[in-house]
Image (spheres, rainbow, N blue to C red):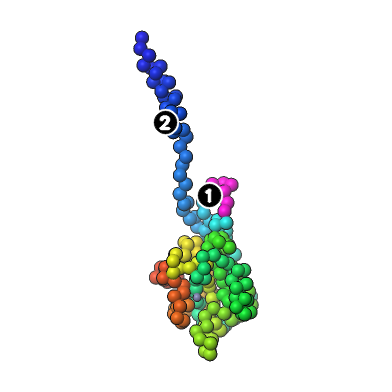
Amino acid sequence: MTHKPLVMLVMSIMAPVLVGCGPRRTTTVDPPLDPVFRETGEPLGYRRQRPAGRRSRSQTTRPSRRPWTVANLSNRWKYIIVHHSATQAGGARRFDRAHRDNGWDELGYHFVIGNGSDTPDGKIEVGSRWRQQKHGAHCRVSPGDSNEYNKHGIGICLVGNFEYTRPSAAQMKSLTYLTKGLLACTHLPASAVHYHRDFDSTKCPGRYFPYARYKRDLRD
Ligand SMILES: [Zn+2]
């Protein structure tokens, strides 16, 4: 009688222990972004798919529904002007403090789109300027000029420094959603959408902002 079957049985039981390969740890990869749509087909937010129980600050939440909606819409608006914050982190509250420290009345932008630092990735914050339908403080070309772009420009700021990094997918989807909503409610053409760098000697919103894709997405 041979002991071969017994030896093989023992080996098969011991092998994982001997070579240290017990249950394999699965390596985690960045999960794909999962757009959240309502019945209307409007994207309201983009949350990362995570195992139950795991939450983090970068997990996105739904931006407020139709953040452009106001009861007292002004007819002053002629431009929509896109900016980056030129900072790695931030949000409306932090920029409001910084702008007041500059001696301005309040947050200079009308909207801020978070990047997962101070607020969730893609979160649209509505500034008090927009609620009041008040002029902006984000695009003054020179001190003595007519201040055309602040008087008539809606300022949207994406948190990030796009001279070094790209905006996130969630930020771009929220920006497109917000811009389309603003164009519809103000009855402005897509040609009213500009960048800070169009008017001022600045690189804002930075070399890695996807200019062509954004304009294409606005047409879709
Ligand atoms: Zn700017």
**Count of picture labels:** 2
Q: Nearer the viewer, residue 202 or 167?
A: 202
For label 1, the residue is: 50
In which quarter of the view is residue 215 placed?
A: bottom left
Residue 165's disc number: none
Q: Amino acid at mark 2?
A: Val
Q: Residue furthest top?
A: 1
Q: Give neighbour class at mark 2: few <14, some 14-19, many 20+ (Cα, 10 Å).
A: few
Q: Amino acid at mark 1?
A: Arg
Q: Is mark 1 within 8 Å of ligand 1?
A: no
Per the image, label 1 sits on a secondary structure element best described as: loop
Residue 19's disc number: 2
Q: In the rendered image, which quarter contains the N terminus? A: top left
Which range is magenta?
50-56
- In-image side of 4 versus 114 (left or right): left
Q: Nearer the viewer, residue 185 or 25?
A: 25
In which quarter of the view is residue 15 placed?
A: top left
Marks 1 and 2, how far apart in space? 32 Å
Q: Are marks 1 and 2 in contact (CB under 8 Å)?
A: no
